[in-house]
Structures are given as C-alpha cells and as structure tokens.
Image (cartoon, rainbow, N blue to C red):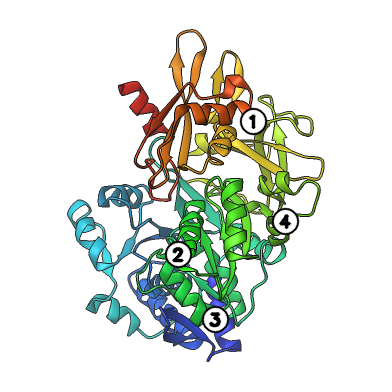
Amino acid sequence: MNFALWLARTATRSPQAPALYTGTTLETDYAGFADQAARIGAALAARGIGKGDRVGVFMKNSTDYLRVLYGIWWSGAAAIPINSKLHPREAEWILSDAQAALCFATPDLAEGLAEVAPDCPCVISGTADFAAMLATSPMAEPVEMAREDLAWLFYTSGTTGKPKGVMMSTATITAMTLSYFVDVDEVSAEDAILYAAPMSHGAGIYNFMHVLRGARHVVPESGGFEPAEIFALAAEMRAISMFAAPTMVRRMIDVAKATGATGDGIKTVVYAGGPMYVADIMEAVDVLGDRFVQVYGQGECPMGITALSRADVSDRSHPNWQARLASVGTAQTISEVAILDESGAPVPVGETGEIAVRGAGLMLGYWKRAEATAETIRDGWLWTGDMGRLDEDGYLTMVDRSKDMIISGGSNVYPREVEEVLLTHGGVAEVSVVGRPHPEWGEEVVAFVVPAPGAALAEAELDALCLDQIARFKRPKAYIAIAELPKNNYGKVLKTDLRARLAAD
C-alpha cells in the first residue's frame, strides 16, 4: 500500500476540501495537494529515483514538507526525515549511511549541508529547482508498493552513539495509522492536525490519519512550538489536534496560567516521547481540560505500543485512577506487551522487568545492522530497553530505561520514582536523577534540580519529602542545583551528560 494512494483517493473523494495551511492562510485544497505531490514524484522519476531508493528530507516545518513526503512516496521511494535541529555533519552522516539518492532541504539548512556534503544532490525548497519540480507533468498514479517495502527510514536520536536507521515498511505505518483510530482518537474531515513539534518525528507521523480523513494540515507561522501562538490558532481554526512531548505540555500549562488561556479550540493533545510526571498531567487537565491522550511507542514500534485514553487521563473516580494516570495505558490493538526477565521468561503481575512488544507495528529491522536487529528482536519480541510492570488490568507502568537504573548496595533504584516525588515540591521546576559511583555501595543516588523561578531550595526540605514517601536507600545523597537540564533535539534529558559531569567533578 503506497501512502500516496491514500492522498490520491482523498483528493478524488473531496477535491475541494481545504488541505494545507500556514497559520490561518489556506494554501491549497486536496486536489492541489495531490497534484503537487504527483509532480514532485514525476520529477524524481525523471532523475531515475523510484522504488528501492531513499530520499532525505532535511527541512524545517512547512507545508512543503508534506508535498515532498508524498512526492517521494508517489515515486515509490522511501523518505528519510532528518531532524532540522541536527548539525549539518550529523545530517550528512545519516544521508551517507542511508545511501540517499537525493535530499530536499530548506534554504537555511541547505547552505550548511552543501559545505559538508557537496556531492549529495540537493533540491532546495523555494528555489527555481523546486519550482521546476512543481511544474513537471504529474504522474497519473503512485507507484505500487508492497506491504514489506521500505517507506520511512527513521534515525534514532543516538544519545549513546551513532544513530541507527529504523526501517518502517508500508505495513508498519498502516498498522499504526489504523490503530490510532481505535486506540487513540477518531479523526473527521472537520479536524486539523497542527505541526508544532518536528515533522521528522512524532508530529509528522500523525499526518497519515488526517490525510485519510481529508482533514486540515496546519503549520504555525513560526514553524515551531510557541504556546501563545498555538492557543490563538486553535481558537480560530477549531478542532485542532497535535503531538506534544511532556516538556511541551509543561510549557503550555505555564503559558495558559500566565495568560488565562483555556485551550479553547484544541480537540486533542497526544503526549509521548518521554516521562510525563503525574503532577504535570493532573495540572494540565485542571488548567486545559479533557483534551489529553498518552501514547507509548518507540522508533522501532512507532506510536504503537500502548495508549492511555482520554477517559483514563481525566478520570478521578476509579479506585485506581492515580496508578492508571502514572501508567502509559494498555496495549494498543496491534500489539502484545509482555514484561520479561533477563532469560526471556515472563515475570509475575506487578513485578518489574524489561518491556517487550510484538505485533503488526514493529520495524523491519535496523538499516544495514543485522547484529543490532538480532539483539533487539528475539523470537518475534522487540526488547524495548525500558523497564516496567503490568497490573492485573493490563495497565503498563514504565519505571525507567534499563540503562538508567541505579544499583545501590545491591538494591535497584529507578530514577523516575525519585523524580516523581521531588517534582511534588513547589520549588522544583525540573529534576533528573542519576547514579554516581560509590566505593562501598556501587552507586549512590544524585539529583540534578532546576529550581522554579524565584525559588530557594533547601536540601533538608527535599530530604524530608523523599523520606516521607520512598525508602531511605532511594533518597538522593546529593542535590545539585542546575540552571537547565541538558536535552537532545527531541527534548529528552541527556543523563549521559549528567553522569559525565559527575565524573569530571
């Protein structure tokens, strides 16, 4: 199934339906969207690019991003979305590793890319070369693609080394798309998807559901995430849905409280991509209302492992509502979830082990890395590297990344548990807990704390808070004030950097 066929069908069914917006300005309807993608596909085919080839997309958020994606698929090739925040050398490495036939880039990124990758053919949006593509006679139909054909080559963030290319087939993304309608949210033609997070990742991968339904696609004029702009857009455009990392949700809460915004016009915020602390999501519902759904997935199983429904996020009446709110929900329709010990045997309900998933949403494997694929997928199960536990009702609670677990005096300490407690202190804006080598205990717990504006944190208060809620051995042995936590381009805290700082000190 070629995704460009989805676009073609929607354009046939609803040619005049509004499709692509920058801010509140309509740029084209679905007939125009499909026609432009077909022209880009034809231009790629004229260059000898088609099925089996890979094409990079090193672009900032724009409506051209969608034109390019569907043009690539129209030709039968696979897209390599590259985060626009990466350094040109990092983008060049990805393009080289993927053996890209061509790369699309926005003007501000193309200059740096040309310096480090002069031999990589590049088409720059907004130039005569790109305009010539849009003037090419369109291909009549998208190239046929089989269920196992590579469609999306996603490179992991690479926080522990060089990123790996995750191969997603047409079947992988089709399964994720259909599961969204069942397990996350329904979409109608009156809805709109807002691309405030990078379109190379979680935000962009939600385009499929909205193309299928003939909904609107909106890129903020800023091209990025500005809470005040989002609130204003939602109020005017209505029925807005969006993907947001937990750090983005936190910023939305803060701006809403400061400005009096209520989230009017926002239909759904799907949050994922990192730990959402219970205190934050409770406040989000209190401030912005019943608009939140949580999804747990990985690049290797995009957005498709579990989901915590809107009802569960907002419920305050069920006897276990707090535990459920701290979870990442239950298995999505396309997935089976298990908690396994080191030998691969299931652990009893309520006990902690590594989260594993199998089902229709798994990747094909890692690009040119058979050994890494074999280590990650064993007997059909994808070992996520995340630690968690399942309750008797099937709710999955993530504890931490296995590599982030601290072993102190032979006992396991999961940083997130400590972080959840510290975040209940009104003077703590952000916190990250890591292990520091200790000659007697193996490791000791250390907390890096970002104070809230104007707050003066006393270690004694933080100690008392921890001792009141968790075991003494889990209490941090040191609290280090820090202006901001180091994060990668996707907003995830770089605990490796924090450990390196401790080692340097």
Name the element at disc 2. Answer: loop
Q: Position of residue 370 (x, y in %)?
A: 51, 38
Q: Amino acid at mark 2?
A: Ala
What crowding class fits label 2: few (fewer than 14 Cα within 10 Å), some (14-19), or many (20 or more)? many
Compute the Cα span from label 3 to label 2: 17 Å
Between label 3 and label 2, give the one nearer the viewer: 3
Residue depicted at x 46% and y 76%:
233
Q: Which comes sooner in the sequence, label 4 or label 2?
A: 2
Q: Are marks 4 and 1 in contact (CB under 8 Å)?
A: no
Compute the Cα span from label 4 to label 1: 24 Å
Is 347 situated left or right of 117 in this image? right
Q: Which comes sooner in the sequence, label 2 or label 1?
A: 2
Q: Which comes sooner in the sequence, label 4 or label 1?
A: 4
Which residue in the structure is indicated by mark 1? 469
Name the element at disc 3. Answer: helix
Residue depicted at x 41% and y 58%:
80
Between label 4 and label 1, give the one nearer the viewer: 1
Which residue in the structure is indicated by mark 2? 77
Name the element at disc 4. Answer: helix
Compute the Cα span from label 3 to label 4: 36 Å
Residue depicted at x 53% and y 72%:
193
Compute the Cα span from label 3 to label 1: 56 Å
Is 42 situated left or right of 303 in this image? left
Which residue in the structure is indicated by mark 3? 8
Is 428 situated left or right of 354 in this image? left
